[in-house]
């Protein structure tokens, strides 16, 4: 079965999207050919408990199982792709469907899962988060910028020559590090240093599915070297060194640095420019990262909805094993917003990140022929500026074999080349054509000179390949249209884009950021937290096809502005690395709790954070989880909602997975016991009750990580329509009472089928405010009854 893995940068706006689309097309073509010529495929075989600690013995046992099935040692060697040894025992192999069926019945084999192709669906940001290096009492100095922490990045690899990865002033590689610097095409051991302390690459699963990687059509390196740019961007955002005077062709100029600039990087290249990441490869990378000794894993990818059961989702399985070893896993929540129930990577042991805007904007002036000036957003640096061009409305230059509706949004092939040539075209987003890059491509094709794209107000801009494109909202678009209609020879002139700082209200939740609730487990609030993910400047791969789009006069791009939850994910990974440096013994759940309970729901001006797409209402936990990350506060959360692996096992049992499925996750025979507890009792830093009938009592346990003798009182803002009581209302901690349990009782007041409503519960000791979101939907028993 093939699902698709998506990088979570906002491809709708990205210049590399076109290329990706093309790759996907080729990929599916290539794939169906492959399917036709061979029924052979890749399967992941999960074995039981690891019986040996010697990894050679484990590997031998995998070979033995395969040899028995296939009849010979040679056939087994040819078939096996990976032997997983560290997180759990199992292997990936090329098997026919009937062989896969047969092996499932072998003793010791717990489950056989087909490989999936997880489909390829800064500067300012750190200052904005108040992580200025000059602040000496903040989290940066207390954690020494993450010194000692190792961040593992599962992505498209790295461009090691980027200045972000220089290791000036860094100490010896920690002696506990077990990783390697795996050589390959244009990558040898001297490409690793004290910053990039490990690099590996994984392609066996990908090639077993699609055949040998053909690099002649596009650039790719059979090595950890990044041909896409995505992995270089996320790695430098997380742990890039300080680079002065970084910019994207002069825009967003300033000091570029990663959030944990003293942390080390371990690179695991699992995604390929030719089309995605194979789950067999991804699992191998998780396995190695656990063995290598990373402290945090940053994973800016995933499969688009519908969500697979956690017991079949490689990312959920790999991260479960990492978390069991104390390694927090941070994932992007997806770019399918602003629609409800689109969030992905929703397992409770993962930290799932939403994207927010920052206070940096790229205003670009448009002067109309009547001397009026209006302002849009773009990344215009040189071409086609400061000269008047005729402007025309897309609808009025429809190609005679298209229709006006399509031409209004400049949909593919909708414009008449004779009439568009040499002109700027005004296009309006429509229900069926929502993307500025599609309009840009259309106008470029008919030899227009520019696009003004009117769309729902949002702040992410991208350097689209082709003619310059300026984003405006519908009001400004309508104004331009009135101007066009008011004069015989309408003309416009674009000015160079300026970089504006601190002049727009922020943060807001990004338009594209996927929203909760989780469609798989709505009682686990997702996303967990929001972090900057809009117009983020970070290092880029000069080999990337989207670098050469600008190649006219400019040298290949070294830095690029990108938007997506892919960009917000490494921001959180960096903060997790800082927290790990300060609190090495905190569990992944404790770290998540610290982030969530200290997050902010107010913007810089003290007003409630709103979301692009619904800008006139307060954002809610389905948009930002606990809120917008506050790195400094997260270092000292006061109380922690902790969880261990037994809690996660209870979650799997409550999800209804059977013993054998749960055993696969835990690596040893596990029996689910009947329990009176519900999913709502999981000790998460949130309480989410998707179906509240009359009343429900939920319990939570908090651990004091602040001053030993602390007294906290509760404060509750009940979700509308629900009465909330907390017992006891005061918690007194001392040297013996470090962990205390409380009950939260919810009573529904509604006598009709309800909507989700939101509130919060906080424990306050006069200094700390430990806040968790409350999410409740009241339901009535007889809603479906025929009355
Ligand atoms: C960071 O937190 C510490 C203690 O939690 C506080 O003393 C300090 O003022 C904070 N710094 C900033 C810049 O908020
Ligand atoms: C790695 O490659 C570079 C450039 O090709 C070369 O100069 C260097 O000697 C190589 N280093 C090793 C250790 O092979
Ligand atoms: C690789 O791709 C190129 C074009 O992209 C094609 O001409 C060539 O035949 C391909 N090679 C193989 C081995 O498939
Ligand atoms: C910074 O970079 C810009 C071009 O990107 C260049 O014009 C300028 O001289 C540089 N400034 C410094 C101080 O290096
Ligand atoms: C626009 O302004 C310029 C000088 O700034 C002036 O020469 C021109 O006549 C003005 N055009 C209109 C239509 O007002
Ligand atoms: C484009 O417009 C020109 C001029 O009006 C017309 O002659 C031509 O047929 C049109 N072509 C298409 C494909 O619409
Ligand atoms: C569109 O215009 C082209 C070029 O003038 C002409 O060949 C074609 O027949 C026209 N198509 C329609 C549907 O009118
Ligand atoms: C456990 O559940 C899986 C599906 O999730 C199923 O394939 C398997 O047969 C079940 N095992 C038992 C023993 O019921
Ligand atoms: C700690 O608090 C508990 C009740 O919360 C109390 O029973 C116990 O005596 C206290 N212990 C100390 C050492 O104060």
Image (tube, grey):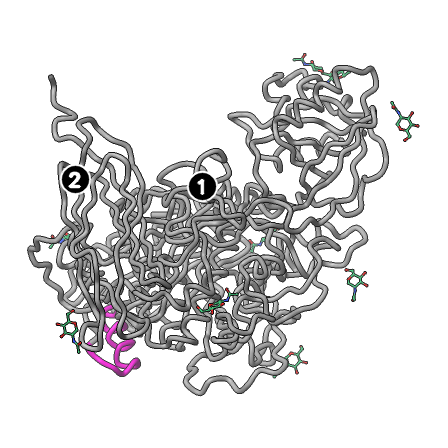
Some atom of ligand 9 lies within 8 Å of the CB belonging to the residue at label 2? no
Q: Secondary structure at mark 1?
A: loop
Comparing 644 with 669, the one in front is 644
Can you tell which of label 1 and label 2 is closer to the viewer?
Answer: 2
Q: Which mark identifies residue 255?
A: none
Residue found at x 24% / y 73%? 64
Q: Is residue 592 left or right of residue 696?
A: right
* Residue designated by label 2: 747
Q: Is residue 112 visible?
A: yes
| Prevailing secondary structure of the magenta residues | helix
Quadrant in which the C terminus is drawn: top left
Residue lying at the far front of the rendered structure: 766
Residue at (70% x, 55% y) in the render: 248
Q: Is residue 572 depicted above or below 747 in this figure?
A: below
The span shown in magenta is: 51-68
**Residue at position x 73%, y 32% in the image:** 374
Left/right placement of residue 148 relative to residue 127 reads left
Which mark, by number, is residue 336?
Answer: 1
Looking at the rendering, the quadrant in which ligand 7 lies is: top right
Q: Does residue 69 sit above or below 461 in this rendering?
A: below
Percent position (x, y) of residue 302? 41, 52
In the image, 110: left or right of 202? left
Mark nearer the N terminus (1 vs 2): 1
> Can you tell which quarter of the image residue 770 is in?
bottom left
The residues tagged by marks 1 and 2 sit, at their Cα atoms, a distance apart of: 34 Å
């Amino acid at each position: 079965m093939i699902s698709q893995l998506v990088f979570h940068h906002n491809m709708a706006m990205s210049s590399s999207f076109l290329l990706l689309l093309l790759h996907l097309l080729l990929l599916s073509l290539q794939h169906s050919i492959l399917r036709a010529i061979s029924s052979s495929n890749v399967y992941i075989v999960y074995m039981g408990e690891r019986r040996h600690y010697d990894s050679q013995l484990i590997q031998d046992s995998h070979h033995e199982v395969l040899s028995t099935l296939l009849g010979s040692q040679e056939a087994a060697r040819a078939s096996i792709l990976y032997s997983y040894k560290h997180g759990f025992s199992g292997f990936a192999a090329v098997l026919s469907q009937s062989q896969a069926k047969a092996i499932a019945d072998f003793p010791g084999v717990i489950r056989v899962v087909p490989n999936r192709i997880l489909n390829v669906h800064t500067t300012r940001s750190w200052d904005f988060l108040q992580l200025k290096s000059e602040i000496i009492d903040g989290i940066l100095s207390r954690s020494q910028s993450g010194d000692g922490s190792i961040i593992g990045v599962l992505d498209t690899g790295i461009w090691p020559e980027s200045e972000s990865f220089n290791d000036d002033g860094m100490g010896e590689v920690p002696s506990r590090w077990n990783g390697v610097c795996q050589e390959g095409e244009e990558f040898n051991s001297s490409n690793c240093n004290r910053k990039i302390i490990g690099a590996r690459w994984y392609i066996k699963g990908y090639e077993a599915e699609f055949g040998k990687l053909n690099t002649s059509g596009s650039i790719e390196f059979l090595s950890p070297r990044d041909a896409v740019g995505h992995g270089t961007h996320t790695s430098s955002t997380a742990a890039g060194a300080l680079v002065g005077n970084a910019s994207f062709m002069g825009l967003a100029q300033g000091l570029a640095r990663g959030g944990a600039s003293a942390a080390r990087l371990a690179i695991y290249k699992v995604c390929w420019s030719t089309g995605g990441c194979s789950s067999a490869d991804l699992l191998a990378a998780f396995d190695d990262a656990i063995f290598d000794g990373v402290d945090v894993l940053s994973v800016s990818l995933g499969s688009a909805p519908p969500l697979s059961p956690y017991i079949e989702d490689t990312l959920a399985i790999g991260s479960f094993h990492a978390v069991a070893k104390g390694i927090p896993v941070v994932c992007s929540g997806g770019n399918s917003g602003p629609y409800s129930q689109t969030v992905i990577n929703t397992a409770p042991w993962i930290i799932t990140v939403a994207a927010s805007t920052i206070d940096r904007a790229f205003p670009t002036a448009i002067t109309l022929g009547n001397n009026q000036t209006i302002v849009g957003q773009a990344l215009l640096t040189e071409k086609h500026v400061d000269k008047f061009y005729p402007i025309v409305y897309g609808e009025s230059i429809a190609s005679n074999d298209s229709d006006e509706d399509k031409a209004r949004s400049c949909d593919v092939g909708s414009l008449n080349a004779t009439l568009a040539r040499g002109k700027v075209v005004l296009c309006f987003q429509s229900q069926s054509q929502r993307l500025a890059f599609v309009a840009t491509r259309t106008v470029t094709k008919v030899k227009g000179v520019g696009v003004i794209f009117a769309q729902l107000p949002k702040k992410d801009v991208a350097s689209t390949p082709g003619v310059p494109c300026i984003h405006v909202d519908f009001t400004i678009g309508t104004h331009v249209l009135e101007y066009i209609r008011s004069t015989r020879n309408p003309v416009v002139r674009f000015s160079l884009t300026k970089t504006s700082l601190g002049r727009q209200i922020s943060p807001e939740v990004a338009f594209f950021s996927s929203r909760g609730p989780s469609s798989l487990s709505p009682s686990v609030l997702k996303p967990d937290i929001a972090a900057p993910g809009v117009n983020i400047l970070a290092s880029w791969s000069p080999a990337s096809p989207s670098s050469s789009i600008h190649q006219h006069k400019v040298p290949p791009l070294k830095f690029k502005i990108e938007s997506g939850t892919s960009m917000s994910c490494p921001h959180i990974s960096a903060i997790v690395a800082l927290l790990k440096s300060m609190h090495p013994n905190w569990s992944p759940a404790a770290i998540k709790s610290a982030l969530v309970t200290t997050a902010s729901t107010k913007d810089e001006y003290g007003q409630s954070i709103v979301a692009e797409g619904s800008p006139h209402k307060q954002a809610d936990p389905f948009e930002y989880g606990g809120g917008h990350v506050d790195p400094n506060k997260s270092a000292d959360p006061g109380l922690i909602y902790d969880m261990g692996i037994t809690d996660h096992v209870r979650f799997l049992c409550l999800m209804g997975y059977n013993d054998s499925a749960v055993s696969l996750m835990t690596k040893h025979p596990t029996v689910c016991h009947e329990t009176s507890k519900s999913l709502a009792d999981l000790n998460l830093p949130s309480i989410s009750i998707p179906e509240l009938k009359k009343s429900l009592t939920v319990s939570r346990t908090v651990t004091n990580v602040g001053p030993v003798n602390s007294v906290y009182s509760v404060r509750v803002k009940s979700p509308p329509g629900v009465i909330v009581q907390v017992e006891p209302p005061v918690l007194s901690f001392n040297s013996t009472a470090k962990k205390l349990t409380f009950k939260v009782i919810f009573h529904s007041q509604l006598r009709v089928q309800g909507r989700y409503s939101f509130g919060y519960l906080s424990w306050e000791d006069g200094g700390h405010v430990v806040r968790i979101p409350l999410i409740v939907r009241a339901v009535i028993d007889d809603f479906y009854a025929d009355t």
